[in-house]
Amino acid sequence: MPKARLPVKMFCVALLVCSVTAEAAPIHLDDFSHNCDIRPLNLSREQHDNLRRIRIEYKKAYDRSVQKAARSERNRRQNIMKIMASDVFDNNSARDYVEARYLSGMDYSVEELALQHRFYHLLTPQQQKVWLATCVR
């Protein structure tokens, strides 16, 4: 019986390595282009200043999200190890694991969308049309 468990343990380790080797980072919304060229908007000096402040807040939100993901990484490893080590696959534990994995990035995505909203409302109606036509996917 111990011989039969050895491949399972090796599989669990391989699966764990594959699941956590990617850097813990927030998930970005892909509904708009992050590197959209805003030059056609011809932003005023005040709009540029406001955009600079929004970008600083965006960077802080991103940094907070990366830190949060790093803190929860250990819990995720422990949870997946419990799921894999169990003699019987537990659908509920697996669902809880997957839900926690994806919900951890949701706060960042909401903050990201809020900052995009703030930027959008800095624009004039004509600039908003251009931004929607060129930056929203």
Image (tube, helix red, strand yellow):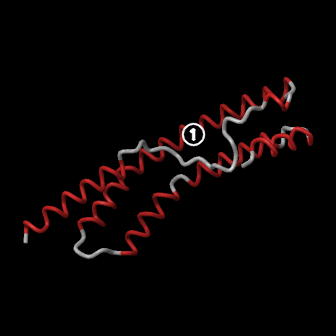
Identify the residue at the far top of this view: 45
| Residue hosting label 1 | 62
Q: Is 2 displayed left or right of 24 in the figure?
A: left
Q: Quadrant of residue 75?
A: bottom left
Residue 23 sits in which quadrant?
Answer: top left
Of the 4 image quadrants, the one containing the N terminus is bottom left
Apparent side of residue 79 relative to residue 60 in the rendered image (left or right): left
Q: Is residue 104 above or below residue 52?
A: below
Residue 88, image x, y percentages: 26, 76
The kind of secondary structure element at disc 1 is helix
Tell me the kind of residue under disc 1. Tyr
Q: Quadrant of residue 84?
A: bottom left
- Residue under the image location 67 percent in, 35 percent down: 35
Q: Residues within 10 Å of mark 1 (few under 14, many from 20)?
A: many
**Can you say whether 95 is above or below 111 in the image?**
below
Q: Residue at x 25, y 59 (%)?
A: 12
Q: Position of residue 117 (x, y in %)?
A: 76, 46
Task: State the residue in front, 72 or 15.
Answer: 15
Which residue: 60% across, 40% down? 61
User: How many numbered marks does the figure carry?
Assistant: 1
Report the side of 50 relative to 106 (left or right): right
Front-most of residues 28 and 72: 28
- Residue 36 versus residue 47: which sits nearer the camera? 36
In the rendered image, residue 29, in percent from the top left (x then y), is placed at 62, 49
Residue 124, position in %: x, y? 91, 38
114 in relation to 92, above or below: above
